[in-house]
Amino acid sequence: MSEASRERVEADRFVPGQPDMWAFVLFEALVFTGYFLVYMVRRSQNLDLFLQSQAHLDLRVGVFHTLVLLASSWSLARCVQNSREGSHRAALTNAFLTMLFGGVFLVSKVLEWTAKIDAGFGFTTDEFFSFYYFLTALHFLHLLIGLGVLGIAVHQLRSPARRSQQAIETCATYWHTVDFLWVLIFALLYVMR
Amino acid sequence: MNDKRELWIGWWTLVVFYNLYGLLFFVITRTQPPPQPSLEPAEIGSWFADRHYGLLYGYAVVSIVGGATAVMNATLAYSMRRMSVSRAFAYSYLVIYALATLPGMLIMGVVCTVGAMRPDRDPEIMSWLYDFAFLSFEGTMGVFLIGSLVWMAAVLLDENHVFPRWFGYLSLCNALTEVVVAPAWIFKSGAFAWDGAIAWWINMGVFVTYTTAFLTLLRRLIEREDFGTGPLPDLATDPGPGPSGAMKSAG
């Protein structure tokens, strides 16, 4: 089967991007469900400690991070829409805007970690902070990979010769998944009392 | 087809060895699932005593069959040689997995055998051997991390459709769970310790899924192999690329 017909067959399956990326979404959702379940079990066993330590997190910082990532998902959705309509210059602008939001999140997360370490809350301080650093660092790593993935989307958009709508939508699927994981991490670490 | 005989030998070596590996580590030596890192020296002495013959006989067999990893790794690397990507992928994979055998299997086996051989040793020394053995085992994580990323890149760049792209993404997922093992170097108890729910149990669940997937896909690769250099033909009954068809065959 040729590459073009293969892509056409996959486009008929009613999911944006490569169906294979949705398999990744499923794998990651299952693995993170495992991490979240372990967190919930440990939290229920040490509720006082978790609540006490959680009080040292600044909810406003968590809200800011969530808004930044939701904005990044919005700009990437616009990028995909622009690309579908053939407005590739606007799509590129939105892809760069998404990268900017991603960068703001990463810098802000490092600043939050630095402030927490300066205040004496490290990876081994207590179990809550172990989970805090573990979940946020793992998400940070996913987002770093996401910036590389966005680089692929930009690379695709820049040249009419290699432009593939499916590849761009596959990249967007990855980014939205990572954003979605953050919303869950935010709810578990910052909000749930 | 007889032309495929060598490939089937490699594939069956993989299947037999993985089962044997499971039997030796989980049943005979009982070193997996790993014990708690927080055991006291006296408890560690009892741990070695309880497994005395299992460790001696089990690791004797490991030392005999360990060389089978060469055939296994070559079969895995063959998939990358059949792809349209540079040979550097297969070479990197071979070298890195040859390295993994050392800390993940041989050093661990030798150190556990040293502990089991003279159970009347000073408990402090036994405790030292215990930490050394399990940290050596954990030491393979970086190798599996890079190995998975090499395979991922090869699958995603390949134009011969040797493996479906979802396997490339599953490789990324496997690589990311190797990163999660890193806290085992820091914690002696809890979810992140070397026996923890996150560092061991979830990681092992992903690894078993990953191994099952690549064994199934390697079998399909051998069935489809035409010994050419272009795209690998689909099987007559192949439901096509993508997760739905491939997942069905894995099940």
Image: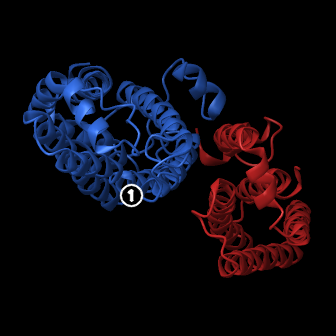
Residue A22 percent location from the top left of the image: 71, 41
Sort mark 1 into few (<14), some (14-19) or many (20+) by Cα contacts within 10 Å.
some
What amino acid is labelled 1 in the image? Gly
* Quadrant of the frame with the N terminus of chain B: top left
Spot occupied by residue B146 in the image (x, y as percentages of width and height): 40, 58
Residue B233 visible in image: no
- Tell me: residue B141, above or below residue A161: above
Q: Position of residue B8 (x, y in %)?
A: 26, 24
In the image, which lettered chain appears red? A
Q: How many marks?
A: 1
Judging depth in this view, the residue of B8 and B111 nearest the camera is B111
Choose top left, top right, bottom left or bottom right for residue B34. top left
Q: Is residue B110 left or right of residue A136?
A: left
> Who is closer to the viewer here, A23 or B99?
B99
Closer-to-camera residue (A20/A31): A31
The quadrant the C terminus of chain B occupies is top right
Which residue is label 1 attached to?
B142
Observer-nearest residue: B234 or A186? A186
- Looking at the picture, the colour scheme in use is by chain
Left or right of B72 in this view: A153: right
Q: Is residue A135 above or below residue B43?
A: below
Chain B painted colour: blue
Q: Residue at x 65, y 43 (%)?
A: A35
Could you say which quadrant of the image residue A115 lies in?
Answer: bottom right
Mark 1 residue element: helix
Task: Tell me residue A15's x, y (percent).
Answer: 81, 41
Image point (28%, 44%), residue name: B41
Chain letter of mark 1 equals: B
Question: Quick check: can you spot residue B74?
Answer: yes
